[in-house]
Image (cartoon, grey):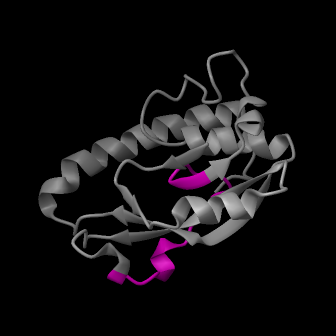
Amino acid sequence: VVFIDSDLVVTPSFLRHHQKSLKGQAQAFTYGRVVNTDNFDDPTSEPFKLSDMSAAFFATGNVAIRRTQLLSVDQSGGGPFDAKFSEYGWEDLELGERLRQKGARIIHCPDAVGFHYHPAFSADQIPSLISQERQRGRNAVCFFTKHPNFGVR
């Protein structure tokens, strides 16, 4: 199973790199590189920047995982994601915490590149950004109620 964000464009070799890195790795998932760009005319011209780094253990912007491993953390029969996370943010980090508790390992796969569309900032985005951060904050409370630790970034 491969997860990518809806505003991510991948390279032609994207799936091959994830598959090659996962081969023979039963308790692991691959984490591909995400390059933020506002240039969708030629996204591959965008260099990887320090601001593109993520310290997240499991974020669904660019990961591949075996279906059996994903379903092994299904708590309710409704799928691997916890439905309590109904707003923006933290649902993938929470899934990652359960995967970590079951012994999952991360394999960094920088050749599986995805270009994530981030438009240049403009003042008219402020109301939606405030709304998104409020949602993220409510889901953070949900996360820390369920997993009272600071092991997640």
Q: Quadrant of residue 80?
A: top right
Residue 83 position, x and y percent, is 55, 22
Specify whether residue 117 is painted magenta: no
Question: Quick one: quadrant of the N terminus?
Answer: top right
Residue drawn at x 27%, y 76% as measured from the top left: 42
Q: Is residue 117 left or right of residue 80?
A: left
Vertical position of residue 71 compared to residue 2: above or below: above
Q: Foreground: 94 or 16?
A: 16
Q: Is residue 145 left or right of residue 34?
A: right
Residue 57 position, x and y percent, is 68, 56
Specify whether residue 49 is painted magenta: yes
Q: Quadrant of residue 147?
A: top right
> Is residue 9 among what the camera can see?
yes
Vertical position of residue 84 compared to residue 31: above or below: above
Residue drawn at x 76%, y 34% as measured from the top left: 68
Residue drawn at x 75%, y 45% as measured from the top left: 149
Q: How many labels sit on residues? A: 0
Question: Quick one: quadrant of the C terminus?
Answer: bottom right
Residue 108 position, x and y percent, is 69, 68
Q: Residue furthest top?
A: 77
Q: Is residue 44 left or right of residue 73?
A: left
> Is residue 55 among what the camera can see?
no
The secondary structure that dominates the magenta segment is loop
Residue 29 position, x and y percent, is 72, 53
Q: Foreground: 24 or 48?
A: 24
Residue drawn at x 64%, y 39% as measured from the top left: 94
Q: Which residues are magenta?
A: 45-63
Vertical position of residue 20 compared to residue 44: above or below: above
Vertical position of residue 89 compared to residue 110: above or below: above
